Image (spheres, rainbow, N blue to C red):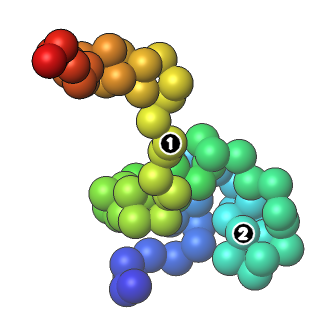
């Protein structure tokens, strides 16, 4: 990805420190917070890419229950 920004420019645009950005770029930090990560993506105009890296969320049990309640039950007719 070519953004044509220096580390200083990107850090300023994202609202984070240059040190945080350098650590993130060099994989020296394992605990960058989501706010900083999203700020970097937003500054790079790549925020829409978040959907590509996040796992698909499971369906909550309450939604499954609602779906099951709407499913018609099989009715047996007497002979």
In this orientation, does residue 10 appear? yes
Q: Position of residue 24 (x, y in %)?
A: 72, 69
On screen, residue 10 above or below 78: below
Left/right placement of residue 71 relative to residue 1 reads left
Name the residue beneath numbered marker 1.
58
Name the residue beneath numbered marker 2.
24
Question: Gap between marks 2 and 1, in whole Å?
Answer: 29 Å
Q: Nearer the viewer, mark 2 or mark 1?
A: 1
Residue under the point 75% across and 60% down: 20
Q: Position of residue 14 (x, y in %)?
A: 51, 51
Quarter the N terminus occupies: bottom left
Residue under the point 50% across and 28% down: 60
Left/right placement of residue 42 relative to residue 38 reads left
Residue situated in front as seen by the camera: 33 or 5: 33
Q: Position of residue 36 (x, y in %)?
A: 62, 48
- Helix or strand or loop: what does disc 2 sit on? helix
Q: Position of residue 17 (x, y in %)?
A: 70, 54
Residue under the point 14% across and 18% down: 79
Q: Residues within 10 Å of mark 1 (few under 14, many from 20)?
A: few
């Amino acid at each position: 990805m070519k953004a044509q920004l220096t580390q200083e420019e990107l850090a300023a645009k994202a609202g984070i420190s240059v040190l945080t950005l350098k650590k993130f770029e060099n994989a020296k930090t394992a605990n960058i917070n989501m706010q900083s990560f999203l700020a970097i993506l937003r500054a790079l105009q790549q925020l829409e890419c978040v959907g590509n890296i996040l796992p698909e969320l499971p369906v909550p049990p309450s939604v499954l229950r609602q779906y099951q309640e709407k499913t018609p039950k099989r009715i047996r007719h007497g002979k």
